Amino acid sequence: EVQLVESGGGLVQPGGSLRLSCAASGFTFSSYWLSWVRQAPGKGLEWVANIKEDGSEKYYVDSVKGRFTISRDNAMNSLHLQMNSLRAEDTALYYCARYDSGGEGYFDYWGQGTLVTVSA
Amino acid sequence: EIVLTQSPGTLSLSPGERATLSCRASQSVYRSYLAWYQQKPGQAPRLLIYGASRRATGIPDRFSGSGSGTDFTLTISRLEPEDFAVYYCQQHGSSWTFGQGTKVEIK
């Protein structure tokens, strides 16, 4: 059974940093792209970042470029999101998601999310 | 960036009725790489449809997707009580974007 479990969320002041993690199990981790998708309270879904199987390619939504860094540790089956210079508009539930292996661009499994709140 | 516009915003229907949800893209979606997700309160999204019309593993056949180019539709043939939720479309062609969602509520 595919499982994705996020951790690392919390309350942080504007301008601060936070590192999210996602522990994966139930599939061959190193064979899949992985993603972060966020959802602001009461709002819709927003794709944040993707990372290739070997970490050699990374993509970001424009609003987080230069502030967020996606990374992975294939030996530990873990995905990370380093978030710097956080803003109030980054407040959201952050989901870790497995990205389709065939390159068709969908997210087939999701974690339950970890909440990030940016507030003074 | 491709913008996805879903309509209607809210759909009020009774169990057993047919639901038709629309997703319109601002530009043609590359190779119909269009997916649909269901999200219930307090839960993560669940993949329903990918490639515009292919059902994901374990998804009942009352859910169907259709469309190409810029116009896509999710149809739920007969609403079950567990189908009342928010539905999102999502594309991958130019980056990855989601629609704003359609809430299917009990009438």
Image: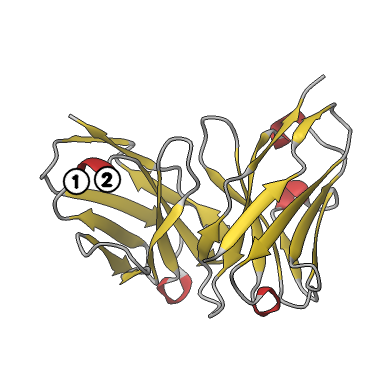
Q: Quadrant of residue B49?
A: bottom left
Q: Is residue B95 visible?
A: no
Q: Nearer the viewer, residue B100 or A27?
A: A27
**Residue sitting at the far left:** B16
Q: Nearer the viewer, residue B64 or A63?
A: B64
Q: Chain of mark 2?
A: B
Q: Which image quarter holds the C terminus of chain A? A: top right
Q: Secondary structure at mark 1?
A: loop
Instruction: Give x and y (percent) for residue A50.
Output: 68, 63
Q: Identify the residue at horizontal 51%, vertical 40% (top origin).
A: A44
Q: Nearer the viewer, residue A78 or B102?
A: A78
Q: How far apart, in angstroms, are the residues tagged by discs 1 and 2? A: 5 Å
The residue labelled by disc 2 is B83
Q: Quadrant of residue A23?
A: bottom right
Location of residue A63 with respect to B65 vertically, above or below = above
Q: Identify the residue at horizontal 78%, vertical 56% (top origin).
A: A80
Q: Secondary structure at mark 2?
A: helix
Hey, what amino acid is under mark 1? Glu
Location of residue B107 with respect to B45 vertically, above or below = above
Q: How busy is the neighbourhood of tag 2: few (under 14 within 10 Å), some, or many (20 plus)?
A: some
Q: How busy is the neighbourhood of tag 1: few (under 14 within 10 Å), some, or many (20 plus)?
A: some
Instruction: Give x and y (percent) for residue A61.
Output: 69, 54
Instruction: Give x and y (percent) for residue B11.
Output: 24, 37
Q: Nearer the viewer, residue B79 or B53?
A: B79
Q: Chain of mark 1?
A: B
Do marks 1 and 2 both belong to one polypeptide chain?
yes
The residue labelled by disc 1 is B80
Q: Which mark is residue B37?
A: none
Hey, what amino acid is under mark 2? Asp
Q: Is residue B7 left or right of residue A57?
A: left
Instruction: Give x and y (percent) for residue B96.
Output: 57, 60
